[in-house]
Amino acid sequence: MSDTRPIGVFDSGLGGLTVVHELREALPNERLIYLGDTLRCPYGGRSIDAIRTFSREITTFLMKQNVKMIVVACNTVSAVALQDVIEVAGNIPVLGVVGPGCRAALHTSVDKRIGVIGTKATVRAGAYGNGIRALDERVTVYEKACPLLVPLVEEGFAENKVTELMLEEYLDELVDFGVDTLVLGCTHYPLLSKQIHRVLGGRIEVIDSAWWTAREAKQILGDRGELAVEREGNDRFYATDMTEEFTRLASIFLRGQMDSVVEIDLHNELTEIQ
């Protein structure tokens, strides 16, 4: 039996579209509904209470779209507000990007020395470090904030020499620590995979949390008997603010053109739901 309800995906901005890309690859028959909260992006500088409120609002909106699963394609929300999403979602499964990355890293690492790169907010929250150590307290985790990588990606410099030099600066410390596995703890970073592999020279296994999240989503829906047998309809994309850069950045993250995007006023949408 085919379950044609869509999968809901959200992020504070556009970085979560790298997760959409991987979901499309892993689950080509599934329809996706994506919401990027571009009006209030980034979440990293917000209070935990604000992030929890935003997450509950977005989850309420996605639930109104009759989704069968919610994928939290935001490291910050996955770190501090995943339980809020789970509470609002009720009986449907919720998957954040942090958990799959932690599980994959632990499974991959031989020496139990794992490196994590992410934004300042993600590293400050210790999301990956705490998640990995909760699974195996014997593991040593080195977390490194790499604040300049996101703007380099957004400026279209993923393949630029400057980016490679910056990666060398950030990654050398983790190599010196002797990590054998590196987690890409930001949804922007999969776009730097080629450069990262080049800098590491095959010495360290790289874990793309977006890739593993898509595979876990497929496993969960399969176990529940809720996979779509064939695709019905198109993906839908929503944004809370349409900036001039939106289309350009969206095509970078999706690695192709985005379908039409609808700008929504989340406050009005929630008022109508109530």
Image (cartoon, rainbow, N blue to C red):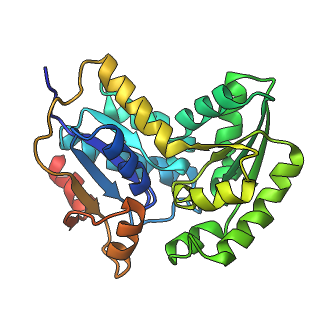
Relative image position of residue 34 (x, y in whole percent): 30, 52
Looking at the rendered image, the quarter that the N terminus falls into is top left
Apparent side of residue 47 relative to residue 62 in the rendered image (left or right)? right
* Image location of residue 86, percent across then percent down: 40, 32
* Vertical side of 43 occupied by 3: above or below: above
Going 59% across and 58% down the picture, which residue do you hit? 194
Residue furthest toward the right? 176
Side (left or right) of 191 relative to 125? left
| Residue for point 74% across, 54% down | 200
Q: Is residue 96 visible?
A: no
Classify 200 as above or below 139: below
Q: How many callouts does the rendering have?
A: 0
Q: Is residue 264 above or below residue 88?
A: below
Residue at figure coordinates x 76%, y 45% from the top left: 203
Foreground pick, 241 / 207 = 207
Q: Position of residue 273 (x, y in %)?
A: 17, 47
Residue 53: % across, % down = 43, 49
66, 25: nearer the viewer: 25
Nearer the observer, 60 or 185: 185
Pick the front one: 191 or 148:
191
> In the picture shown, does residue 159 fall above or below 234?
below
The image quadrant of residue 114 is: top right
On screen, residue 29 versus residue 130, left or right, reads: left
The residue at 38%/24% (across/down) is: 219
Determine the residue located farthest toward the left in the rendered image.
232
Q: Is residue 25 visible?
A: yes
